[in-house]
Image (cartoon, rainbow, N blue to C red):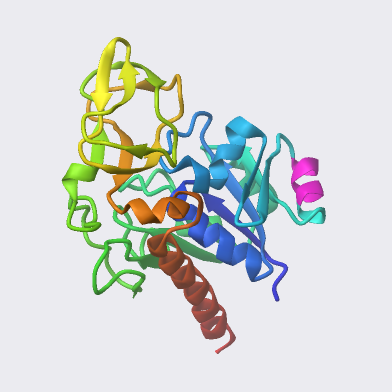
């Protein structure tokens, strides 16, 4: 449908819902990542191409690139290029029509309205009409995916979404600083108190029975309080570990809506 360049800052699991929909809608998508992403739901993160060089999510291929020529080569081959560029230098180089901040850092790491004709940010940390053109609500509930034209998204509650009656219980944080050594893999069925990983020599155990939906990459340097794993209590939902989430798809649809809205209003 479109051939405009869209640069998406961040390639995590929520960002990947937007990346997928942008790609399927015909945009030329470039993903900017940091040198060492610390994603949990790694099987559905296009940013994992930084480590793997090539990842495939729901039949869409993302490839790591290192220079401008490789970006255009990836687009020519109908792939999504992923480049390490935390500062956004490729925004200045390529001058995209659209920039989407999908880092979800809950604060603005430098995205501004001067970066492109159309700018969008996901979640808290941005003010619509000041930092970017449109902010998209990422908080689960009635307003998930709502376009915000003036003001901010809801502040982060710090409380994980409820799945099958579990919220905080299903998310595991590191209690120590150190190097993680994973024992379990994404998609494994786990029981409460099963050892999921060690941080140095300290065991990190499952808090509930379920499916290990996400765990941070093996040998990552972690710190106390860092989210490192996520358990889905629904044993029948193992396949969901390998597909983009409902929340990410909802937000991705809102990104497409925001772009079409801004384009239509520009015409008028």
Say left or right for 244 vs 184.
right
Q: Nearer the viewer, residue 39 or 26?
A: 39
From this viewpoint, which residue is outermost toward the top? 201
Q: Nearer the viewer, residue 156 or 95?
A: 156
**What residue is rendered at 60% in x and 41% in y?**
89
Q: The N terminus appears in which quarter of the rendering?
A: bottom right
111 in the magenta segment: no
Residue 68 appears in the picture as rendered: yes
- The x, y position of residue 52, in whole percent, is 63, 33
**What residue is rendered at 37% in x and 19% in y?**
180
- The x, y position of residue 174, in whole percent, is 25, 26
70 in the magenta segment: yes
Say left or right for 48 vs 232.
right
Say left or right for 147 vs 3.
left
Figure check: 179 above or below 51: above
Say left or right for 79 vs 76.
left
Q: The C terminus appears in which quarter of the rendering?
A: bottom right
Q: Total of numbered circles in the picture?
A: 0
Residue 11 appears in the picture as rendered: no
- The x, y position of residue 60, in whole percent, is 66, 55
- The x, y position of residue 15, in whole percent, is 47, 54
Q: Nearer the viewer, residue 194 or 66?
A: 194
Figure check: 32 above or below 50: below
Magenta: main secondary structure equals: helix
**What residue is rendered at 70% in x and 38% in y?**
65
- Magenta region, residue range: 68-74
């Amino acid at each position: 449908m479109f051939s405009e360049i869209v640069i998406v800052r961040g390639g995590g699991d929520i960002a990947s819902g937007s990346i997928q929909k942008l790609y399927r809608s015909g945009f030329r998508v470039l993903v900017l990542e940091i040198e060492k992403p610390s994603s949990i739901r790694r099987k559905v993160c296009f940013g994992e191409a930084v480590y793997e060089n090539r990842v495939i999510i729901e039949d869409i291929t993302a490839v790591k690139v290192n220079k401008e020529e490789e970006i255009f080569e990836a687009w020519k081959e109908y792939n999504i290029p992923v480049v390490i560029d935390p500062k956004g230098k490729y925004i200045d180089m390529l001058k995209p029509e659209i920039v989407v901040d999908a880092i979800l850092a809950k604060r603005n790491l430098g995205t501004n309205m001067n970066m492109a004709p159309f700018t969008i940010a996901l979640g808290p940390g941005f003010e619509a009409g000041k930092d970017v053109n449109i902010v998209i609500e990422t908080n689960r509930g009635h307003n998930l995916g709502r376009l915000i034209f003036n003001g901010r998204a809801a502040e982060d509650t710090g409380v994980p979404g409820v799945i099958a009656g579990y919220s905080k219980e299903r998310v595991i944080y590191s209690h120590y600083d150190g190097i993680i050594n994973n024992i379990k893999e994404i998609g494994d069925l786990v029981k409460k108190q099963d050892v999921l990983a060690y941080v140095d020599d300290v065991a990190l155990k499952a808090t509930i029975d379920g499916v290990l939906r996400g765990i941070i990459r093996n040998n990552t340097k972690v710190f106390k309080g860092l989210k490192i794993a996520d358990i889905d209590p629904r044993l029948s939902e193992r396949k969901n570990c390998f597909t983009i989430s409902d929340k990410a798809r909802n937000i991705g649809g809102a990104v497409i809506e925001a772009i079409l809205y801004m384009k239509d209003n520009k015409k008028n």
